[in-house]
Image (cartoon, rainbow, N blue to C red):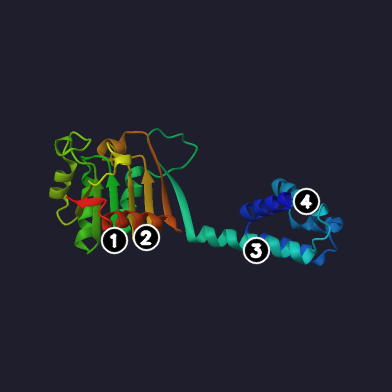
Amino acid sequence: MKELLEVIADIATNTPQGKVEQLGSLITKSSGPLDAVTFDVWTTAPESRSRLKRLIDAWKVLPELSPVELSAMLRAASYVHNKVSNEQSIELVWTGPSSAMVPTRKTEQALLQVINAAQDRLFVTSFVTYKVGSIVDALNKSTARGVNVSILLERSEADGGGVSNDGIGAMKKSVPNAKLYYWANRVDAFSGGKVHAKVAVADENLCFISSANLTGHAMEKNMEAGVLIDGGTTPQKLQRHLEALVTTKQLSRA
């Protein structure tokens, strides 16, 4: 059964839903795996034919599985795959040298997309912030259109934190209508810990998770990697988690 499920998942993931429906119809009309010659009209593509052969071979091991049941399994897998794909997209984000072979989004583009998309709530975190004019402009535009903007940063060394510059003070001046937070109440297990998370999440629907700090070098010069997630449960969980840290007073208002 495991091999059959594996090949069904492979077909559902790599085949247009219409083609899966077509294969399901052919299977329903067949008498079983030994009638596989009737499936030859389904495709001429080598990879698809290889998947079809694997499907037939796995079906032969399970002769008790009826054509109607196999057809339903294929169609259900295809439906779920397409539904999930339409509900969530995950995009690779990369700053640094290009391979010229794999297309990627830039860090600054992805971060600005999240900030500009926010209509109600926006939460941004970074270890350090320095010289990010385009990001500051976008944050100010967000607050101007009524977005509740929250920003979590590491405190300066002078305030007991781990960065040399006062990013919180600078951000307060640059984005005066945002709510600034720092990690104050560290239990013993996190003693000496720092705010190393670099994320941005808007309206529980769109989030960017990255290695990049809010700095000019991170936006333009450093080798940074991240993912932009649109839809699904991850943006929702991330935003609710950050806001819960505020509610439970693990984060303090600067």
Mark nearer the N terminus (3 vs 4): 4
Measured in 3D between alpha carbons, the distance from the residue under mark 2 to the one under mark 4, in whole angstroms, is 42 Å
Q: Are marks 1 and 2 in contact (CB under 8 Å)?
A: yes
- Disc 3 residue type? Ala
Callout 1 environment at 10 Å: few (<14), some (14 to 19), or many (20+)? some
Measured in 3D between alpha carbons, the distance from the residue under mark 3 to the one under mark 4, in whole angstroms, is 18 Å
Taking the image as shown, residue 166 lies to the left or right of residue 233, namely left
Q: Are marks 3 and 4 in contact (CB under 8 Å)?
A: no
Measured in 3D between alpha carbons, the distance from the residue under mark 3 to the one under mark 1, in whole angstroms, is 36 Å
> Residue 229, labelled with which disc?
none
Q: Which residue is mark 3?
A: 76
Looking at the picture, how far across and down is residue 90, in whole percent?
Answer: 46, 51
- Disc 2 residue type? Glu
Q: Which residue is mark 1?
A: 121
Q: Which residue is mark 2?
A: 204
Looking at the picture, how far across and down is residue 126, in whole percent?
Answer: 28, 43
